[in-house]
Image (cartoon, helix red, strand yellow):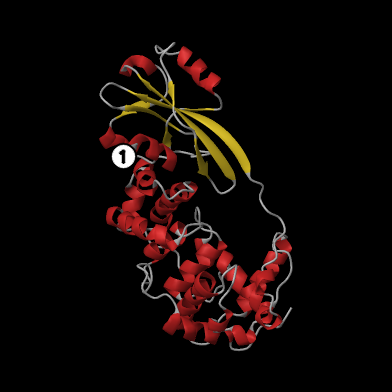
Amino acid sequence: MSEAPAGFAGRVVRWQQTHGRNTLPWQNTRDPYRVWLSEIMLQQTQVATVLDYYERFLQRFADVRALASAELDEVLGMWSGLGYYSRARNLHRCAREIVAVHGGDFPRRAEVLQTLPGIGRSTAAAIASFCFGERVAILDGNVKRVLTRVLGFDADLSVAANERSLWVHAEALLPSRGVREAMPRYTQGLMDLGATICLSRKPSCLLCPVREVCTAQRAGTPEDYPVKTRKGKRSSQSLWLLLARAKDGAVWLQKRPESGIWGGLHCLPAFDSPESLRAALANTKRAGAKLEEGEAFLHVLTHRDLHLHPVRTTCARSTFSGVDGGWFGADEWRVLGLPAPVRKLLMS
């Protein structure tokens, strides 16, 4: 592996100023609430998807106190469709902790930010760097790719000790002059390089501002980095979703457990088999009801393929007396936190 290249940080800062992304709505601000919100939304989600959600979220929750005072159901409703709903639950918990413990002010140091719900080491560093100019390294997926290529770091990042070693190298590359002004540019520059130039496949090395100090580019092997051998296994699951409507159009929804798939969201009753669905109905006033099974469809999660089977029926509101859940009209369920495929079914 090569030594830390001289002048690396300066190259990144200068390139970001003239060629990086500078017009996104969460840029050109040192408001930690807006930066934090964008960082959480952008985890495993494309910029184009986040843009609309970010603006709508800010219109409803203008600052951390507004978010903290909201009910979780409303937060999940605003998040509905973005996926990875644990992010929204942690966002809400974090806002309440910032208000309760820190008086509504974000801590200024990454070390403290990292103790808050849903804020990991890299996210904490991004907030501290962007908003407070702290000299601290980030290491998200894009940045790992940039740095491993520049350094020729070929250790397997699925090994925790190797990732810790990369953190040390990332810290050694940080700007050392004019830190308060340079750090936001440098941090954003690394993100921009990974998102627009140093792509996982077919990187645009000729356009890269650090190509002259990049080990992988000199060797002609950028696509060999980063090295990570352990990959998550995909699983498959089939679920039968009971779409029960009352005569007035209301639908029956239940709240999912906090842990597991679609945790904490409102959802159509879900069953592992058509037999278990019918068995559940047998315990209600809807035993023997006519069921219409619709066409199954695939919903893809990060590590799991869901094969969803909608089953429709019409029934009286008294059908589910004594069963956990509730009837929701269209004006009510539209603002709830719903899994994307369930929202799609209800709107079809």
The C terminus, quarter of image: top left
Compared to residue 328, the image places residue 200 above or below, namely below
Name which residue lies at 42% across and 33% down: 267
User: Where does residue 50 sit, x and y in percent of width and height?
Assistant: 40, 58
Quadrant assignment, res 8: bottom right
Residue neighbourhood size for the residue with mark 1, other residues' Cα within 10 Å, grouped as few (<14), some (14–19), many (≥20): some
Name which residue lies at 54% across and 20% down: 276
Quadrant assignment, res 35: bottom left
User: Where does residue 26 sit, x and y in percent of width and height?
Assistant: 37, 67
Looking at this view, is 118 or 282 the one in front? 282
Compared to residue 33, the image places residue 14 above or below, namely below
Quadrant assignment, res 212: bottom right
Compared to residue 62, the image places residue 77 above or below, namely above
User: Where does residue 13 sit, x and y in percent of width and height?
Assistant: 49, 83
Name which residue lies at 53% across and 22% down: 274
Disc 1 residue type?
Arg
Q: Which residue is mark 1?
A: 334
The N terminus, quarter of image: bottom right
Secondary-structure class at tag 1: loop
User: Where does residue 23 sit, x and y in percent of width and height?
Assistant: 36, 73
